[in-house]
């Protein structure tokens, strides 16, 4: 039998198996929920009102079309917080300023526990069959310690030329020699961001091995798609998606483990893995760090990088303003001796502090794309005693969900919230007078620890794309899109455009 035959046969029988296990999975969930629902306790006076109807249906919708589910139920509940069940877990969907303050600042609410059950796709070293202890607090302390070590200014300045070279190497392939190449940003820009994130958090041996890098990128994608409602609702049920997720985690672990072991016996460099080895971190800790950072780093940076470029391709007046800001930055920091060198060589001499402080227009454009696109939810679990939000009670063990759109798309905070207007961030007093008025980089107890490096990566991409290349947004027929793309807010991992694929026609214009 040819490889093609066996692949096709494999996928067909795999499809049957999936159907059978999927159906059995649904039946088991249904039975479990009906039994649970029959015996679950009645609502108490201080409980958040529970959605009526079959809880399984709500849970399924929560995993399947999260944004629409939350919005429609907030509407049905007259804009008030509500609760529903995911199996035996009580999940409270919160709205409003008081709830937001509690969500982001109450020390009883744990971020890691929230994501573990309600998101589920992140690779965990403890999912691989190995004796290992992981605690969320331990993870956070480790991540913060390691990130501080790796993402300081001196190290980033060191890595900056390599990051610029990464962009050139990738992007030159898309649109070389004056002939426009056509790319799907959600594949190609994602690939670029993955490479840059790997550059910051792994080692050169890996980033120069295109085959392994692609394989690792694909494994992360498998992990994301393995977080199906069945695999999340019934973690013990051997669904195909769950098996694929476990398999991907094991393969990821094995591949990355090989790199860490090889680096232990190689000449030390300033690559992230080498820095951690030199600092005496255990292999286990290095693995936990690398797997988690690649995962959290890629998702949001990938989404925002794609959308900031799409938004600028649509709003060309802002594209021109960004271009001018980069040209001004270059003329402030370069002397005549560099006038004949390639653009990326010019950009590499600009200090990290200038990238951070001297690009307010780029910063405003990134922030505006972030505000509009990041309308997904943040998750927590109450791991201590009961807490109160207003008159209502969150019991120990309850999960909490807060939609970023509650702030970002709120017309009281941001007039005409769906309108792309980076100018709103450049006016005096740009931030609304409210508690935690912008959640794009987290807030309160859990600010994003990768913000600086993510902003730098996105500004480097913008600087190169706006000055070395030309890119135009087109639909499948090569025309400027009508209607314009909008993010699929239910697509929690990629926020791809709703209903169609859009492309960039990409062309190199200078060396
Ligand atoms: C555009 C890119 C990024 C955006 C928009 C972003 C956004 C966020 C947000 C909103 C949170 C808070 C989540 C919550 O409250 O539940 C967060 C947390 C976090 N981010 Fe980012 N992030 C980005 C890139 C990165 C990168 C590149 C890294 C690491 C290399 C990173 C590491 C983390 C970590 C470890 C946390 C959890 C902090 C904690 O547990 O207290 N992020 N990020």
Image (spheres, grey):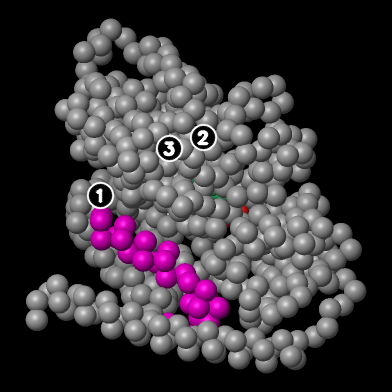
Ligand 1 within 8 Å of the CB at mark 2: yes
Q: Which residue is mark 2?
A: 366
| Left or right of residue 195, residue 301 in this image | right
Rendered position, 283 above or below 427: below
- Residue 418 is at least partly visible in this image: yes
Q: Is 3 in front, or is 404?
A: 3
- Residue located 21% across and 80% down the image: 9
Instruction: Assess whether residue 144 is covered by the magenta stretch.
Output: no
Q: Which residue is mark 3?
A: 481
Mark 3 element type? loop
Q: Position of residue 474 (x, y in %)?
A: 37, 37
Q: Position of residue 157 (x, y in %)?
A: 37, 32
Prevailing secondary structure class for the magenta stretch in the rendered image: helix
Q: Is 123 in front, or is 509?
A: 509
Q: Is 219 in front, or is 85?
A: 85
Q: Are marks 1 and 2 in contact (CB under 8 Å)?
A: no
Please state the extent of the stretch shown in magenta in the rendering. Answer: 213-239
- Residue located 52% across and 84% down the image: 26
Q: Dot 3: few (<14), some (14–19), or many (≥20) neighbours within 10 Å?
A: some
Q: Which residue is mark 1?
A: 207
| Left or right of residue 39, residue 24 in this image | left
**Outermost residue toward the top in this view:** 336
Rendered position, 462 above or below 495: above
Callout in the foreground (3, 2):
3
Callout in the foreground (1, 2):
2
């Amino acid at each position: 039998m040819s490889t093609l035959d066996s692949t096709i046969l494999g996928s067909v029988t795999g499809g049957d198996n999936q159907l059978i296990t999927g159906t059995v999975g649904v039946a088991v969930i249904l039975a479990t929920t009906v039994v649970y629902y029959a015996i679950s306790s009645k609502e108490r006076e201080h409980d958040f009102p529970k959605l009526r109807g079959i809880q399984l249906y709500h849970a399924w919708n929560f995993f399947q079309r999260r944004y629409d589910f939350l919005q429609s139920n907030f509407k049905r509940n007259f804009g008030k917080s509500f609760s529903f069940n995911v199996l035996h877990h009580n999940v409270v969907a919160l709205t409003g300023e008081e709830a937001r303050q509690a969500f982001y600042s109450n020390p009883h609410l744990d971020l890691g526990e929230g994501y573990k059950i309600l998101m589920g796709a992140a690779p965990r070293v403890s999912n691989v069959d190995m004796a290992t202890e992981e605690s969320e607090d331990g993870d956070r302390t480790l991540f913060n310690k390691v990130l501080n070590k790796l993402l300081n200014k001196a190290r980033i300045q060191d890595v900056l030329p390599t990051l610029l070279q990464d962009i050139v190497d990738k992007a030159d392939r898309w649109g070389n020699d004056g002939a426009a190449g056509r790319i799907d940003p959600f594949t190609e820009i994602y690939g670029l961001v993955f490479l840059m994130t790997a550059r910051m958090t792994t080692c050169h041996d890996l980033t120069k091995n295109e085959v392994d890098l692609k394989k690792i990128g694909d494994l992360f994608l498998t992990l994301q798609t393995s977080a199906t409602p069945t695999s999340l609702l019934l973690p013990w049920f051997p669904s195909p998606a769950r098996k694929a997720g476990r398999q991907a985690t094991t393969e990821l672990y094995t591949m990355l483990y090989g790199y860490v072991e090889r680096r232990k016996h190689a000449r030390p460099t300033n690559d992230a893995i080498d820095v951690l080895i030199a600092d005496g971190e255990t292999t286990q800790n290095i693995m936990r760090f690398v797997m988690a950072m690649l995962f959290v780093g890629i998702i949001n940076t990938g989404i925002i990088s794609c959308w900031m470029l799409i938004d600028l391709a649509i709003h060309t007046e802002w594209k021109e303003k960004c271009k001018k800001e980069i040209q001004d930055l270059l003329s402030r920091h370069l002397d005549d001796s560099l006038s004949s060198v390639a653009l990326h060589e010019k950009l590499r001499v600009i200090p990290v502090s200038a990238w951070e402080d001297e690009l307010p227009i780029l910063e405003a454009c990134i922030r505006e794309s972030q505000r509009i696109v990041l309308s997904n939810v943040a998750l927590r679990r109450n791991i201590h005693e009961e807490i109160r939000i207003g008159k209502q009670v969150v019991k120990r063990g309850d999960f909490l969900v807060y939609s970023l759109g509650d702030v970002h798309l709120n017309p009281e905070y941001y007039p005409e919230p769906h309108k792309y207007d980076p100018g709103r961030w450049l006016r005096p007093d740009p931030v609304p007078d409210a508690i935690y008025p912008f959640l794009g980089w987290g807030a309160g107890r859990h600010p994003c620890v990768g913000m600086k490096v993510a902003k730098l990566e996105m500004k480097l991409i913008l600087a190169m794309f706006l000055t070395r290349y030309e890119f135009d947004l087109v639909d499948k027929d090569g025309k400027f899109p009508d209607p314009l793309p909008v993010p699929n807010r239910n697509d929690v991992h990629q926020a791809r455009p709703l209903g169609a694929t859009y492309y960039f026609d990409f062309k190199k214009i200078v060396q």
